[in-house]
Amino acid sequence: MRYEPLNLGRWIVWGAMALVFIVVPLAFSGGFALTMLIQMGTLIIFALSYNMLLGQGGMLSFGHAVYSGLGAYLAVHTLNLIGKGAFPFPVTLLPLIGGFAGLLFGVLFGYVTTRRAGTTFALISLGIGEMVFACVLMFPGFFGGEAGVSTNRVVGQPFLGITYGPAIQVYYLVATWCFLSIVAMFALTQTPLGRMANAVRDNPERAEFVGYDTQKVRFLQLVLASFFAGVSGALSCINFEIVSSENVSALRSAGVLMATYIGGVPFFLGPILGAIVFIFFAVALSGFTKAWLLYLGLFFVTVVLYAPGGIVSILLMQIPVLRAGRLRELLWPYALAAGAALIAMVGLIGIVEMVYRLSEQGASTVLNVFGMSFDARTTAPWIGFALILAAGIVALRFASRLVGARWGAIQQDLLARQP
Amino acid sequence: MEFFLVQTLNGISYGLLLFMLSSGLTLVFSLMGVLNFAHASFYMLGAYFAYQVSVKIGFWPALVIAPLLVGAVGMLVERFGLRKVHKYGHVAELLFTFGLAYLIEEAVHLVWGRLAVEYRVPPELDGPLFQIMGSQYPIYRGFMMLVSVAMLVSIWLALTRTRVGLVIQAGLTHPQTVEALGHNVPRVFMLVFGGGAALAGLAGVIGGNAFVTDPGMAAAVGPIIFVIVVVGGMGSLAGAFIASLLIGCMQTFAVSLDWSLGGISVAQAAPVLPYLLMVLLLIFRPTGLMGTREG
């Protein structure tokens, strides 16, 4: 990358991003949309901070919620102290408290976890996560036990009329912190530390040979990532006004891992997109079906199996084809594959929902979809949905072969055209 | 004194159960380099399958059928899932098994509900086995020990005395050579993965009714067996054995002691102890008790 003090393209990209943050709540102004946007902003910071470990440092962590959760706990106690009038502190800067708390615990736990890399790191991070979760339940005085610690975000003197009472003010708080964090984390990827983290990820032996202490690089990367995790934890504390043991749970750590991976680990943009998709699953889909975790898991496993670079990699793969003006040839196969996937999904969803209706005590066994109703106790809908699923899978195999053949031909042409 | 004796026996039986789990995990890890995150989920599946079979037929058939079913599930997972992601490297494999663990848990929620199922110890194994100085020792604990020791001895014999076992052992260190000699290494992988899953399933069959069979059992045991693998040293069976017994005894003693330290009783601190042990060990001996493998 060439050094340019006034890089116009960069200003345009970041400016556009800031504009999106400002404009989005005007486009989707409903209360539900706003809660989703706030959660997306929080998760974007968290997922990006997670990707500092997995994507940039090659550290697969199963316990990243520890840092955001402990940050959130410190933030909630600070907020309560401000509420009691112990000391004046602007709520706007509360994420800094969360961030530094995360950083502190990052220093503490990171010293142990980053001693090893690879699979062992993953296991140790899991162990630390479980340990913190058990401790949270052990000290109900500070952590509030199962119920958690609740708070009130409207404290202190309003500044320029900002009280953080209405959700839209919380949105702009989250958006500001989210934008700043994205800029900061992107800037970190360009620093020598960010580059060395990549080197340690790709070839730790050589990095060590060049004279870098890989353990130290991993440690610094983890500490910085914990800071941003803490920021996101404090923001979620301001948003929900409650922090409970769920904030440090393995489920939370699994969630951020899934969000990041679905988006695309190798790309800086990946976690941002992944966070948006994840919140869509968690907030929008969970209103429709109780099996949303299963669908999320299936989606995640599909991404791991067929698109290890995440959604962003699939989108980026289209760019050379688009440039060559040959995307049109792929439109039909894509439409065919999408249709086949849709058919398979209808069959699968039908079966899953019927299983759910049979197992849940007291739930009605009648499934109402598309203006039709099926009774899960009769055999006919089972056979019907199984047939739809089978047909969808067969069609999907056929369509994916077609896509593969066209794709291969185009790639070969593109390669042949290169000098 | 009798407290100490009974608790030691309990600890050993729990430790042996943990070793049934961690041995399968260690074998799969050393052979394929894959840390199977879904291993504890296979344990849970074993318990649920056994519950289903024991309701329909009885406990004794379940003791055979459930592990075989879980083994079959394991082989299918290896053949159609793990082999596909193998080309993307170890992180992708770990993530795949992680996603699988998540899916199995959700599927169990979906099929058997969120509450514990009534998977009971069969009546012929219910009751005291013997008495030590006034306190009773249940038959089922003895049965658990018997099954785990029998299984471990047969595994050891199969690994060291049979042809398949020798091929597996050779595949641990020299997969290319074994392949060049005409053995189907991917099929060996599939067998070992299925075998590891079946071991976990068997542990589930005998552990599910001794403790509790609910959708949280995988998440409760999973982290403990990963801690065992780390404490014992990645890929070391002997290390896993020592660590299993150590943590089994530690957990059993901790929950039954009523000492307290600074307002927190040992029983309250029990869930944290294995992780504390792991942290301390990693500070002083980063490779684990018997570990040699770096990375």
Image (cartoon, helix red, strand yellow):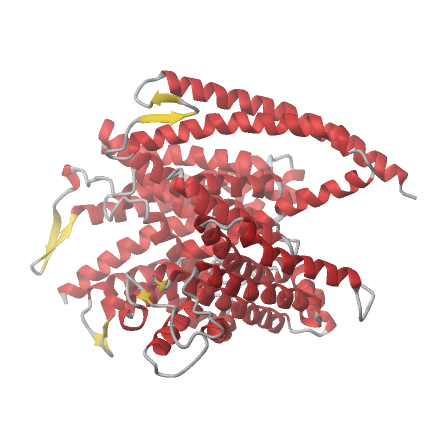
Q: Tell me if B105 is positioned left or right of B261 in this view.
A: right
Q: Residue furthest bottom?
A: A87
The quadrant of the image that shows the C terminus of chain A is top right
Please tell me which residue lies in front, A351 or A7: A7
Q: Position of residue A319 (x, y in %)?
A: 75, 43
Identify the image quadrant of residue A385: top left
**At 44% across and 47% down in the image, what residue appears?**
A283
Residue in view at x 68 percent, y 43 percent: A315
Left or right: A8 in relation to A102:
right
Residue at the right extreme?
Answer: A419
Going by the picture, which residue comes out furthest to the front?
A: A161
Is residue A30 in view from this perspective? Answer: yes
Q: At which x and y percent is residue B77?
A: 49, 37
User: Which sits in the foreground, B92 or B252?
Assistant: B92
The part of the image, by quadrant, that contains residue B292 is: bottom right
Residue B276, given in percent of the width and then of the height, sits at: 38, 69
Pick the residue in front: B89 or A190.
Answer: A190
| Residue B156 seen in render | no
Q: Position of residue B174 (x, y in %)?
A: 62, 47
Q: Tell me where residue B67 sits by quadrant.
A: top left
Quadrant of the image containing the N terminus of chain A: bottom right
Report the number of numbered marks.
0
Q: Residue at x 84, y 38 (%)?
A: A414
